Structure formats: structure tokens, C-alpha cells
């Protein structure tokens, strides 16, 4: 059964704020309900479980992240800059009110030895969209034959940067961008 859009917005806002700052296990559903100002009946009309609510919050966050990344790509002027625009997007997303001290997807995956299916799906969707978008952006820079490998290398740099933000909340993307640029330049080969 559906719930009002305003109630869903309140639930997702509260879930996003609490789960991705305090942690999923450390945040009881009652805290989300209190922050959202909705009843448990409202929550369970929309979501079968706490994990389903977390997955919905991740899905919403993923859509927001892709919008920020699309804007960064649109502002880039060269194929190389479009490929490295992921770092512009990471910086921009971090500055948003709903930005997190690190990656909500990494945090969610890290909380479970074996994540429930709905959480695994949300994390996998994020990972695969990162990989496929990086691969697509790499093709004009390094060619189709090298794009997949470069995308995987850049995904590792992006993920490492996000994890580093947990260790050092003030950490900025400049070092990760420099590592990524070196990988891109090495993959592209010498210019003539």
C-alpha cells in the first residue's frame, strides 16, 4: 500500500540523515520514526523492513549523486576532463546538505557480513553505474579496448578516496584526482 509523498519524503530524509551518519545498526527504527514524525504503521505500509527503508534511501541518494555527476560532466570541456569529472562531482556532492562524511554505499555494505538482498542490490547498482559511466567516459580517451580496465582502476581510486574521507574527514579529492590523472595519461599513451 502506498503512503503520501510527504510522509515518504519525511521517512527518507530521516533515514538518510540517521542511517548514513550514525550507522544502520546503531539507529533503531524508532529513531527514524521520531525524526520523521510518522507512525510505524506508515513506515510498514511502504517498506517491509528496516533494510527496505535503507535501500530506498540509498536508491534516492544514488539518483541525486548521478544528477550531480551529470552536471559535472556537462561542465567539462574535453573528453579527459569529462572522465575526471567524477572528482568534481564527489567534491560537489560532499558540500550538499545531504552529503556524508564518506560513502553511504560503502558504509551500508560494511555493516553486514552478508547484506540482505535489497541492500546488496542498491550497493551493486551504485557500483555498476560508477563502473559503466567511467568505462563510457574512458572510451574517447583511451579507446574501447582499454576503457574497461581503466574504469576498474578509476573505480578503485574513487572508492579509496571515499574510504579515506572516513579516516580524515577533511581529506579532499586532489590526491585521488592526481592518481586518476596519472592512470588516464598512462593508459592514453604518449601524445604526438
Image (spheres, rainbow, N blue to C red):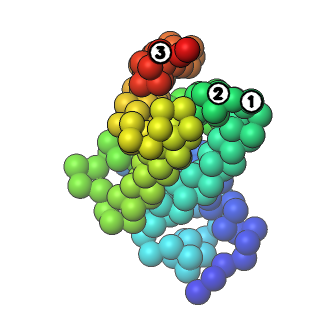
- Viewed as shown, does residue 137 lie left or right of 158? right
Q: Residues within 10 Å of mark 1 (few under 14, many from 20)?
A: few
Say which residue appears at 54% left-offset and 32% top-offset. 141
Q: Identify the image quadrant of the C terminus.
A: top right
- Image quadrant assignment for residue 88: top right
Q: CA distance from mark 1 to mark 3?
A: 21 Å
Query: SS at mark 2?
Result: helix
- In this view, the residue farthest toward the left is 113
Do the CB atoms of the residues marked 3 and 2 lie less than 8 Å apart? no
Say which residue appears at 39% left-offset and 36% top-offset. 146
- Viewed as shown, does residue 43 lie left or right of 149? right
Q: Which callout, 3 or 2, points at the residue further toward the start of the chain?
A: 2
Say which residue appears at 63% left-offset and 82% top-offset. 2
For disc 2, the marked residue is 81
For disc 3, the marked residue is 190
Where residue 77 is drawn, which disc sits there? Answer: 1
Amino acid at each position: 500500500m502506498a503512503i503520501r509523498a510527504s510522509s515518504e519524503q519525511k521517512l527518507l530524509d530521516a533515514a538518510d540523515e540517521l542511517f548514513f551518519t550514525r550507522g544502520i545498526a546503531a539507529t533503531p527504527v524508532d529513531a527514524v520514526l521520531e525524526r520523521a514524525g510518522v507512525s510505524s504503521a506508515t513506515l510498514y505500509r511502504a517498506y517491509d523492513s528496516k533494510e527496505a527503508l535503507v535501500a530506498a534511501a540509498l536508491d534516492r541518494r544514488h539518483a541525486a549523486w548521478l544528477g550531480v555527476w551529470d552536471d559535472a560532466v556537462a561542465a567539462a570541456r574535453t573528453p579527459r576532463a569529462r572522465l575526471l569529472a567524477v572528482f568534481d562531482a564527489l567534491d560537489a556532492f560532499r558540500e550538499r546538505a545531504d552529503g556524508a562524511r564518506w560513502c553511504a554505499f560503502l558504509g551500508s555494505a560494511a555493516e553486514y557480513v552478508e547484506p540482505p538482498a535489497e541492500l546488496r542490490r542498491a550497493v551493486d547498482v551504485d557500483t555498476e553505474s560508477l563502473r559503466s559511466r567511467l568505462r563510457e567516459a574512458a572510451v574517447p580517451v583511451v579507446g574501447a579496448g582499454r576503457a574497461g580496465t581503466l574504469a576498474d582502476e578509476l573505480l578503485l581510486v574513487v572508492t579509496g578516496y571515499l574510504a579515506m574521507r572516513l579516516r580524515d574527514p577533511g581529506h579532499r579529492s586532489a590526491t585521488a584526482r592526481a592518481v586518476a590523472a596519472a592512470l588516464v595519461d598512462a593508459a592514453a599513451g604518449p601524445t604526438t
